[in-house]
Image (cartoon, rainbow, N blue to C red):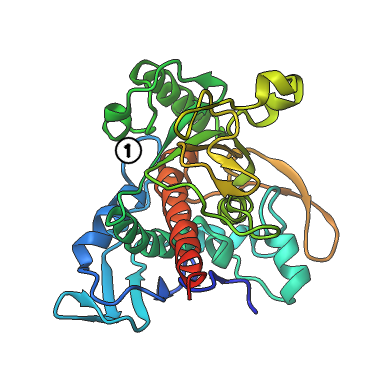
């Protein structure tokens, strides 16, 4: 296996490189008859595409999706759905100076050690551009989940140490950092712009809430719901950690404080578990937070080595996001949707 395929019954296989001709995805296991068109997918891709604001990369890509198979008369046929997104605004010459260098924080060194060859142009397969295929697949998964009354909402809660103090969901898509607190959003934007002017970058934290999921979803022991969500989310480039519910704060709590008491007929008095106990959904809101590292591509000088092991100095030029958070929000939602629909199909298979 190449490591580019996820899922058991709802499978997603992404393809393409940042500076190649196109990126895209093949999705198999879609429920036949699902009403689906390119506009359904495009609205999600538009949330992820570059060039949205002063806090994202200036690379200009329309990210127009083309559905090549799996749809007939506006409905999914149940056969593999192939979606392609052509690359247009790439400047490979911007990466000529790092052709033989290992950029700190990047996958240059590890890719070369694994494959014996690497595409240095815009990080190739390791580029965040790979996530366009995930978002396209996630749009399909989201539509299937919506039919079951399940919704997913991700948003920024921390950038560069600036934290959201309020949760106002209707403001998330109306500010460039996709924060849930409009006052914090203004400060976050300024923090990103300041870092970019210094040729630097900042990281942050994304929170995600899943609602409408019934109790009982999850496969013990190895395919727990939180384990599968963690795998899907951690597989997104730039993500370095994940916690559910109380998360790491649980380490400082007592059992009495952390345990979620139950109320009749089948509710919980708190949600420190984050909606998952024993790897299986409780029916409560699933909530998790994701640590996003600062963008590796910065234009400040850094020490490194070249492919011959000799010391060198590296400066990464080109067009990059000074903070990944604003554009990673729809990716987190997409991966969550992909994991959930795959596990729901596994749950349905349990009845046969």
With 254 as the anchor, is 197 left or right in this view? left
| Quarter assignment of residue 35 | bottom left
Residue at the disc numbered 1: 53
Rendered residue at 24%/70% (across/down): 34
**Where residue 58 appears, x then y in whole percent?**
37, 46
**Where residue 252 appears, x then y in whole percent?**
75, 20
Foreground residue among 89 and 209: 209
**Where residue 42 appears, x then y in whole percent?**
25, 59
**Where residue 186 appears, x then y in whole percent?**
37, 20
Kindly state the secondary structure of the residue where label 1 is placed: loop
With 235 as the anchor, is 67 left or right in this view? left
* Residue 342 in sight from this viewpoint: yes
Outermost residue, left side: 73
With 40 as the anchor, is 3 left or right in this view? right
User: Is 167 situated above or below 343?
Assistant: above
Rendered residue at 37%/44% (across/down): 212
User: Is 24 situated above or below 194?
Assistant: below
Foreground residue among 76 and 166: 76
Quadrant of the image containing the N terminus: bottom right
User: Is 127 situated above or below 23?
Assistant: above
* Label 1 crowd (10 A; few <14 / some 14-19 / many >=20): few
């Amino acid at each position: 296996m190449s490591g580019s395929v996820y899922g058991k019954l709802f499978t997603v296989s992404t393809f393409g490189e940042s500076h190649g001709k196109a990126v895209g995805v093949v999705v198999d296991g879609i429920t036949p008859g699902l009403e689906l068109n390119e506009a359904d997918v495009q609205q999600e891709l538009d949330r992820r595409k570059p060039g949205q604001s002063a806090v994202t990369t200036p690379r200009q890509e329309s990210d127009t999706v083309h559905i090549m198979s799996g749809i007939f008369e506006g409905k999914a046929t149940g056969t593999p759905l192939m979606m392609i997104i052509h690359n247009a605004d790439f400047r490979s010459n911007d990466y000529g100076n790092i052709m033989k260098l290992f950029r700190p924080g990047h996958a240059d060194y590890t890719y070369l050690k694994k494959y014996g060859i690497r595409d240095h142009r815009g990080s190739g397969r390791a580029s965040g551009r790979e996530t366009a295929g995930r978002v396209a697949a996630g749009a399909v998964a989201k539509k299937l989940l919506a039919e079951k009354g399940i919704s997913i909402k991700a948003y920024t809660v921390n950038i560069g140490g600036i934290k959201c103090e309020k949760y106002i969901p209707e403001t998330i898509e109306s500010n460039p950092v996709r924060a849930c607190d409009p006052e914090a959003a203004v400060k976050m934007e300024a923090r990103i712009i300041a870092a970019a002017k210094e040729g630097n970058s900042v990281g942050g934290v994304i929170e995600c809430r899943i609602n409408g999921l019934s109790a009982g979803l999850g496969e013990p022991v190895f395919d727990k719901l939180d384990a599968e969500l963690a795998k899907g989310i951690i597989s997104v480039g730039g993500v370095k950690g994940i916690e559910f519910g109380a998360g790491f704060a649980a380490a400082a709590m007592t059992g009495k404080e952390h345990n979620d008491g139950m109320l009749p007929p089948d509710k919980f008095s708190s949600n420190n578990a984050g909606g998952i106990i024993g790897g299986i959904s409780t029916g409560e809101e699933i909530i998790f937070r994701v640590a996003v590292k600062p963008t590796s591509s910065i234009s400040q000088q850094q020490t490194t080595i070249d492919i011959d092991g000799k010391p060198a100095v590296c400066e990464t030029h080109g067009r990059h996001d000074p903070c990944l958070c604003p554009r990673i929000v729809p990716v987190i939602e997409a991966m969550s949707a992909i994991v959930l629909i795959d596990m729901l199909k596994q749950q349905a298979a349990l009845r046969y």
